[in-house]
Amino acid sequence: MASALKYIFNMKRLPLLLLMVAAGVFLTMKTLGTEKSSPPSKYEKILQTVGVILAQGHFNPKNINDDFSKKVFHKYFEEIDPEKNILMQQDIDALKKYETRIDDEIKGAPVEFFLEASKVFNKRVEEASKYYKEILHKPFDFTTDEYIITDSKKLKFASTEAQRRDQWRKKLKYLTLDKYVEALELREKNKGKEDFVVKTDAELEKESRVKVEKIIERMFDRYKFKFNDDDKFNLFVNAITQTMDPYTEFFPPLDKRYFDEQLSGRFFGIGASLVYDEGNIKIATLLTGSPAWKSQQIEVGDYIMKVAQGKEAPVELMGYVVEDAVKLIRGKKGTEVTLTMKKKDGTLKNVTIIRDEIIQDETFARSAVVDEGTAKIGYIFLPEFYANFEDPNGARSGADVAKEIKKLKQANVDGIVIDLRNNGGGSLYDVVQIAGLFIEEGPIVQVKDREGKPMIMRDKDNSVLYDGPLVVMVNQFSASASEIFAAAIQDYGRGIVIGSTSTFGKGTVQRSIGLDPESNFMSSSSDLGSLKLTLQKFYRINGGSTQLRGVTPDIVIPDQFEYLKFRERDNENAMPWDEVNKASFKIWNGGYDIQSVKNITNAKIQTSPLFLKIKENTAKLTKRNDRQYTLQIDKFRKEQSEMRATVKELETLLKLEKEMSIAYLPEDAKRHALDENKQERYNLWLKNLSKDIYLDQAVKVIDEIKNQQNLARAKQKNGIKSF
């Protein structure tokens, strides 16, 4: 059976459907084997299914052998105890017998490693939870010259109980020192003001310890009440999948539903936003017209203590964070959820609500116009390439961006800026549609699976919705579909890409596969969960991959986050860069010298005192990014003062002295008139944009494009030709 399956999986250009059917047959045959054994547990079913799909479907699978097992073994401990202050080295040593067995568990052996590790972890949590109250009971001596290291890669598990306790002492001392210094500075700032109570150093130090105690107590509540075996198993499976590559990921059912909701901008819930407050989940806002608002029984400021699904027993929210609570409260349309609310007067009240559709339109494309007096520049903000795959009439980023462009054209804008900063990607189909709005028919991206040659995804529409000056804004948080769009615009010479030294560098394509063999894995949702599997890699039409390297903007602007190491190239399990053949495409003729625009703007930025200062301050932050901190108060205050001064100066530099004139289009001005909270957030968004130095630079690039177009027209009018 195994050899037959291997033959099927090795067939060239194997359709995904056949691959999943074959995997289902294989797993069914294993279950129906002749050897007598106990039925596999849920954990074993999931792990074996994941193992088969990884080996037979992943774009570039690593051999699941003892070496792979060792990597997963160590990665799991990094995930479950990143600060290395719960477990001890002796625990790792005792569990080392599983170091080369994980690959066997993936291939069908009984699941034992994570369960044994879980028992040890729970025991150590109980021990560690006794440290913090004892340590925080006494004042700290902040005159001692010592340091704490917070970089997990530099930390080691404690060899003795005394070492582990000292790790906790330093952690608690650091957290207390931070709050204590903050309190001292607040006292200095407000001393002499009416009604301000001046407290002694001892009082402020004690209050700081009490605050830290509450923070740590909440952390241990989460470990004890929320972090169960299922959660630890999810970490274990993802330690396996992300050893393959960073984006192959296991989703339990609730997490999968939440992921889909984020991508589609649509979910079924009660219409309330939540906030974490002193260990409780509190109602922050209510959406006008939503089920929660209509109930007239839920108010802003109420606390949610329990959540029950229909007639099921309620789940206590002790130890839950906001995202956990949200996953419980959301569900299928028309289903019932009962919330146990703690009202402002302290009484408890059960409120039953029928879930309904909630539209997250704040994640959808929106536009505004920058009015320079002599010119108007259209601005389109696209936070993600969203798509509702389950509803053909649902929101799609491709259709929405087209609508915004049409509105801007009617407003007679002189150019368009598309802002993809912090856009992590989304629908591959929609990015092709959006790129096609700016070019004539042609290739947008090349996609390759692990067996075949690249497939070219094209814009098949000869029409161009917008042919005027175009600028694309990106930063190091722009990933995946954002990089496809920016690369296509750059390769065609259709517009100018402006931003940080490079984008994120994610050049892989994933697809969700349900883990239920009974549906032949074709349902992306199943009771066992789903696997978001890396099946393909995409490439620019010039042949190069965006994987690892990202997209280098035409115009590079110093960025305040450049010192952070979080791009794809900073992940040790990232897939490599490579290239394929260049696709055939025609360079856009925009009626101007694009290279001149780049040269002129880059020269201005490189000599700009403003951006030179941003670059200098970013370099300072880079040097301080070693994550080692002093616990001596005078040194700590000096370091913090220098850091804050740098950050404050950066914040000032990043805001324009003279705000741009930017406004909604008339038809959007009252977009959220019925929801004051949402309208206020939109107005604040517009206010922040008016001070944005990066948007200001994008507008200046549009101006330079217009200048170059005017020069080209003048030369043509005078009969001057360039050779």
Image: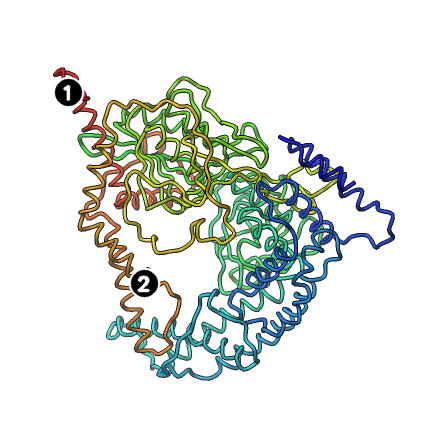
- Tell me: 330 left or right of 153: right
Quadrant of the drawing holding the N terminus: top right
Q: Which of 690 and 426 is in front in this view?
A: 426
Look at 60% across and 40% down and name the residue there.
512
Look at 44% across and 50% down and name the residue there.
569
Near mark 2 (Cα within 10 A), the count class, few <14, some 14-19 or many ≥20, is few
- Tell me: 315 left or right of 628: right
Q: In this view, does 204 lie above or below 663?
A: below
Q: Is residue 580 above or below residue 639?
A: above
Near mark 1 (Cα within 10 A), the count class, few <14, some 14-19 or many ≥20, is few
Residue 685 visible to an observer of this rendering: yes
Q: Label 1 sits on what residue type? A: Lys
Under tag 2, what secondary structure? helix
Q: Is residue 536 above or below residue 351?
A: above
Cβ atoms under marks 2 and 1 closer than 8 Å: no
Q: Nearer the viewer, residue 700 or 661?
A: 700
Residue 703 visible to an observer of this rendering: no
Res 715 label: 1
Residue that label 2 marks: 623
Colour treatment of the image = rainbow
- Image location of residue 568, percent across then percent down: 45, 49
Quadrant of the drawing holding the C terminus: top left
- Image location of residue 471, percent across then percent down: 31, 34
- Tell me: 316 left or right of 166: right
- Image location of residue 427, percent across then percent down: 50, 35
Q: In this view, does 213 lie above or below 350?
A: below
Q: Which of 96 and 533 is in front in this view?
A: 96
The tag earlier along the polypeptide, 2 or 1, is 2
**Spatial CA span between label 2 and label 1:** 50 Å
Look at 63% across and 55% down and name the residue there.
234
Q: Label 2 sits on what residue type? A: Lys
Look at 52% across and 64% down and name the residue there.
82
